Amino acid sequence: MPDTITIIDDRTGKQVTVPITDNIFPATAVRELDPSLFIYDPAYMQTAACQSAITYLDGEAGILRYRGYPIEQLAEHSTYLEVAYLLLNGELPNPAQLDQWKNDVTSHTFIHENMRKRFVDGFHYDAHPMGMLISSIAALGTFYNDAKHIEDKSSRDKQILRLIAKMPTLAAMCYRFSAGLPFVYPDNNLSFPANFLNMMWKIGSYEVDPRLERAMDVLFILHADHEQNCGTHVMRGIGSSHPDPYSAVAGAAAALYGPLHGGANEEVLKMLAEIGTKDRVPGFIKEVKDGKGEKRLMGFGHRVYKNYDPRARIIKKIADEVFEVTGRNPLLDIALELERIALQDDYFVKRKLYPNVDFYSGLIYQAIGMPTAAFTVLFAIPRTSGWIAQWQEMLLDPEQKIARPRQVYVGPEERNFLPIEER
Ligand code: ACO
């Protein structure tokens, strides 16, 4: 069978034959056929917008790999900082490289005092931590005038370090502000996840439990990248017009905030609390099915996974380890019952709806003591390494240009302006 597709324009009889590699049909064939012809693909259901060597995802088989390494192996043997290095550089670091990288990140954890005093202190007392984080990331960029030199590798590398290192500081700062607690400065003697937990929870003396430190690190690994999802697509889209990376990360974080994306873990907890008891699960499932898409089972379904999300499987395992320290989250039983019933129900089976990464992560965050409103902030910290890796890849890709899709105009034909007294 030839690895080609031929398209024929029946209007003109013109035909174009194009090679098919990796199941990709090049849109250039359409341009060749007729430059005024466009492909209509709302929500990019059938469109690949870039080539990427960072993350491999097979949604039918439930496979996720960073730079070729299975997520299960990374979650078991690696650390978030090592994974961030891998995403950014393509290879795992050797011992000297890892020491240098950890040292570099650790020495960039502090933020300018004015970020907190002049900027964060201006938020309303009940501001949502994610809204604060998004604006804080953009504000942080204004402290680094060199950040706009994105064509300069040494400037890019500096911003990469700053963004990865300062995200936990910004995140903890936003939480402490909303809780009315004094800011805790980074402790550079601690590991990346332990430093974050310390900034979140330290009041008087506080020691990070090593089991929670490891759980946090694994959660960071699992959330680090997920190829061309909504937030990453925004990162590349904003980055394609060449602003500083802080502006692009702020935009990507805003996309992550939505309840259909990274905001879903917050919604899962609200949903489980609304269900309240295990015996009410069947009734809730019925409401979802009768709602015909209006009401959703949050933490279920995925644009790409049509199988169990491998991250959800790992998170389910960590949950047990966390609950040994914190005590069992009572909502877990409701979640397990929801999963059990949904996975047997024809409605969910037929649509291939399985638990996604957000289904169990919120239960762990809640058990550790994280407020529900801060859940998406916890997602944004590690996803920053994925966003920046994708941004860097896009900048260095000679095929990429400013992102600019076309539209199908369906508005009124030309008409004459009417003076206000005639309307
Ligand atoms: N509960 C009930 N039904 C669902 C759900 C759900 N969670 N998700 C999809 N469906 C149904 C839809 O109603 C639709 O049914 P239909 O064919 O009868 O119309 C069908 O499954 C396909 O759904 P789409 O919305 O077309 O799927 P899409 O790929 O566009 O959406 C999404 C993916 C947004 C993740 C969706 O599954 C959803 O809303 N899930 C709940 C929110 C969530 O958990 N988001 C987190 C995703 S992971 C992440 O972003 C980090």
Image: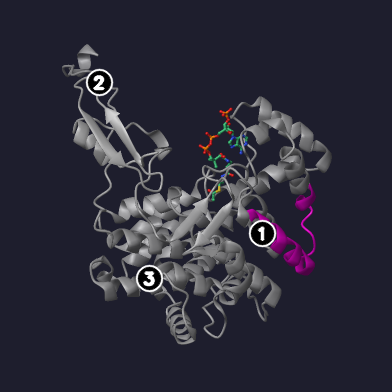
Q: Nearer the viewer, mark 1 or mark 3?
A: 1
- Report x, y in % for residue 359: 65, 50
Q: Which residue is mark 1?
A: 315
Q: Nearer the viewer, mark 2 or mark 1?
A: 2
- Tell me the tag on residue 342: none
* Of callouts 2 and 1, the N-terminal one: 2
- Report x, y in % for residue 12: 19, 21
State the residue in front, 351 or 333: 351
* Of callouts 1 and 3, the N-terminal one: 3
Q: Is residue 13 left or right of residue 26?
A: left
Q: Distance between the Cα atoms at labels 3 and 2? A: 51 Å
Q: Quadrant of the N terminus?
A: top left
Q: Residues within 10 Å of mark 1 (few under 14, many from 20)?
A: many
Per the image, is 223 magenta? Answer: no
What colour scheme does the image use?
A: one colour
Q: Quadrant of the C terminus?
A: top left
Q: Secondary structure at mark 3?
A: helix
Q: Nearer the viewer, mark 3 or mark 2?
A: 2
Which residue is at a point 77% across and 57% down the rendered structure image?
Answer: 329
- Tell me the tag on residue 10: 2
Q: Which residue is mark 3?
A: 160
- Report x, y in % for residue 323: 76, 64
Q: Is residue 405 visible?
A: no
Q: Which residues are magenta?
A: 312-333
